[in-house]
Image (spheres, rainbow, N blue to C red):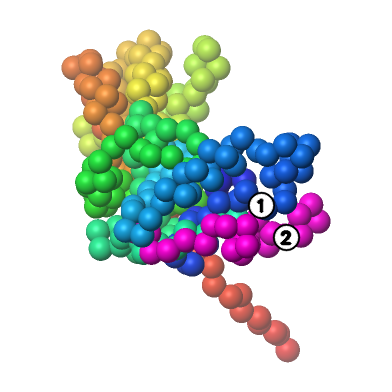
Amino acid sequence: MEDEYPGLWQLWFKYQCVTDGHSPEKRWLMRGGKNDRDWIVTRNALKKINPEDLIVVALPGCRIGRIGRVLSTKITDEDWDALVPGDSDWKQGYMGRRIFVHWELESAPDSPDQVVQLPEGVSLGRGTLHRVNRPVEWFREVIAEPANWVRMVGLFGYERALSDYIAHYPYRLKDGLEPYPNEKIREKVFSDGSRADVLLLDGDGKPVIVECKRESPDEGAVRQLRRYIKRLKDLTGEQASGILVHGGARTVDEKVWREAEKSLRVKIEFFHYKLDVEFVPSCRVSFS
């Protein structure tokens, strides 16, 4: 739902509820007068929800919001109370069936701007509302680990800006790192058209290739970095090490660690970055 209604999770968090968007009228219009099959499945699931049941909010990108304990429901056609304002297409509003919950926040991020990244490969199933096949304690353990907390909105196109920052301030990434002295090599485009994000030197004068990823790294990112290391050795004869700088969750999947450890001659490290953006009112200055 977050893809269709950006910011919906923040509204759920604020109003202590989750919602369903099958309108009393629109579900008929969409099917030319025939009842929407998805609504039938959802309606049957809604009827089974009782106070004290637990709901986990699934979000895009294999992430979850929080666990909510059901307090009450307002899910009939007569209860329709739109959480998302209407528009020219549908003045009645959207997301009007509400399930009121109490969010579990004792061991979870206390801001809706932070959500929880699940391990790679975990599936929460398909459908608007359905049972999940993992015990609630498993979700609670994942939520309680701060290394799994990520920003809800974090997919700005800032990989290039991050690379430029590391190139100018390499010591902020790791003590002892310095810019690579040969700019022709540092900016070298390899024969296949690819180019490493940043090329540095460590404290021993050995080259270090840095690759930046805005999300959690996968096995493909490790193999990509290893290819850059090989191409640099072919070009200069120097054996480089590698650093993967990544966003997403601070935890790195075990499969990715194993991929990085396949070659004993090539050292690859992982560093997580966090980006904070602050807005303050501008000042007006007048000159007389």
The answer to if 73 sits in the magenta stretch is yes
* Residue nearest the viewer, comparing 245 with 240: 245
Residue occupying the far left of the picture: 264
Amino acid at circle 1: Ser
Is 112 located above or below residue 209 in the figure?
Answer: below
Mark 2: give few (<14), some (14-19) or many (20+) Cα within 10 Å: some
- In this picture, which residue range is highlighted in magenta? 66-94
Quadrant location of residue 185?
A: top left
Instruction: Give the x, y percent position of residue 19.
Output: 53, 55
| Residue 23 tag number | 1
Q: Residues within 10 Å of mark 1 (few under 14, many from 20)?
A: many
Task: Judge left or right: residue 190 versus residue 268.
Answer: right
Q: Earlier in the sequence, mark 1 or mark 2?
A: 1
As displayed, is residue 79 above or below residue 42? below
Q: Amino acid at mark 2?
A: Gln
Q: Quadrant of the C terminus?
A: bottom right
Residue 232 in view of the camera: no
Q: Residue at x 41, y 43 (%)?
A: 63
Mark 2 lies on residue: 92
Cβ atoms under marks 1 and 2 closer than 8 Å = yes
Determine if residue 35 is in view.
Answer: yes
Q: Position of residue 14 (x, y in %)?
A: 47, 67
Q: Which x, y percent locates residue 197?
A: 45, 31
